[in-house]
Amino acid sequence: MAGNSFGQIFQVTTFGESHGTALGVVVDGCPPGMALSTREIQRELDRRRPGQSRVTTPRQEPDQVEILSGVFEGKTLGTPIALLIRNRDAAPGAYDRLRDRFRPGHADLTYFLKYGHRDHRGGGRASGRETAGRVAAGAIAKKLLTHVGVRIVAGTIQIGKVKASQFDPRVIEKNPVRCPDAKAAARMVGLVERARKNGDSVGGVVEVRAMGAPAGLGEPVFGKLDADLAAGLMSIGGVKGVEIGAGFAAASRLGSENADPVLYRRGKFFTRSNRGGGILGGISTGEEIICRIAVKPTSSIALPQKTVTERGKPATIQIQGRHDPCLCPRIAPVAEAMVALVLADHLLRLRAQVGFKK
């Protein structure tokens, strides 16, 4: 499978660069007859779009989606759905100084080493702007998942050293950092604003929860649900680590402390705790699926940085473009989208292999 495509049955292929003409995605494998409107897709894109607040990039992009194919009279046809998002506020000239020099911590270097040619305008394909196509596709996956009762929500649970002490989905969209803890959110906003004023950036952790996912999703041994979730989430630019359930905390526990006791009530199996994050042996249990991603600080910062040119000569750069001082607020809807894409794909794979009951 090509590196710009994801999924087996519910497959998406994204295209476009940060300061190119447009971005977009082709979604193939969506079942026919599902009601779908631009409004539903736009709602998700509006959560990801730039220029939302002082803690995000000031770039102003409306991110208006156009459905080019695959939908007729408000319903999916079962044919490829092509979605287009035009760039309206591109400013490629801000990157002229980066034409022959690499940004530390950015994919500028590796794209050059691999291809011998790169788009220096905001990182091109390696820009976070590429994720607009994922979010548009994720909106379709989310709509598909609602038919079996799945709901997905992501929130910023840590920025720098500030951590949330609770996860209340009701407050996530009520603060600019998308934190599920209102008190922690205020401290997070202050931290991000200080980093921005200093010309710097700050990292964090985003948690994604999927409620209502049926048991049986996942195909051992190489198609495990948690493996595909990890792959999808790690494919997001800026993500440097993924945890499922207890994650790395499990490494410091005894087996007796980490196991989830199995119970049975009213015809259903469930666990007393959920340290496995809703997945055992690569297959969903029917419990809430919980993932966390570690998000690095934005590489593009306003402070002077040491680097080299494409010819290896020492140089100093100071980024002039518009960038997020913290990626977490806008990565949250992207993380939701990737989890939705994985679950939608596995739902269709489960139906194809053994059927599913709801």
Image (cartoon, helix red, strand yellow):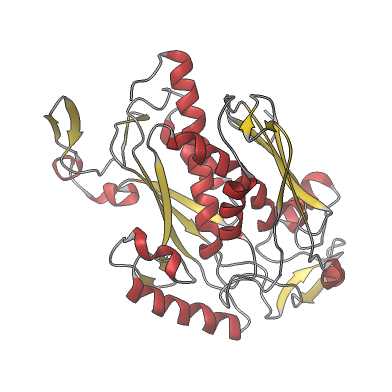
Closer to us: 257 or 271: 271
Which of 127/44 is in front?
A: 44
Q: Residue at x 79, y 62 (%)?
A: 88
Q: Is residue 95 left or right of residue 191?
A: right
Q: Quadrant of residue 123?
A: bottom right
Query: Where is residue 90 shown, x and y percent of the image?
Result: 80, 65
Which image quadrant: the N terminus? top right
Which residue does the image show at 57% across and 54% down from the upper left?
43
Based on the displayed image, in which of its 4 quarters is residue 323 positioned? bottom right
Along the line of sight, the residue nearer the viewer: 284 or 174: 174
Please provide percent x and percent y for residue 40: 57, 47
In the rendered view, tell whether residue 40 sits above or below residue 148. Answer: below
Q: List x then y, in percent, for residue 227.
A: 46, 35
Residue 80 shown left or right of residue 46 in the figure: right
**Whether residue 14 is visible:** no
116 with respect to 80 (left or right)? right
Q: Position of residue 321 (x, y in %)?
A: 75, 72
Horizontally, residue 134 falls left or right of residue 96, namely left
How many numbered discs sit on the rendered protein?
A: 0
Does residue 186 appear anywhere in the picture? yes
**Which residue is at a point 31% across and 38% down the rendered structure image?**
278
Q: Is residue 48 above or below residue 10?
A: below
Q: Residue furthest front?
A: 73
Quadrant of the image containing the C terminus: top left
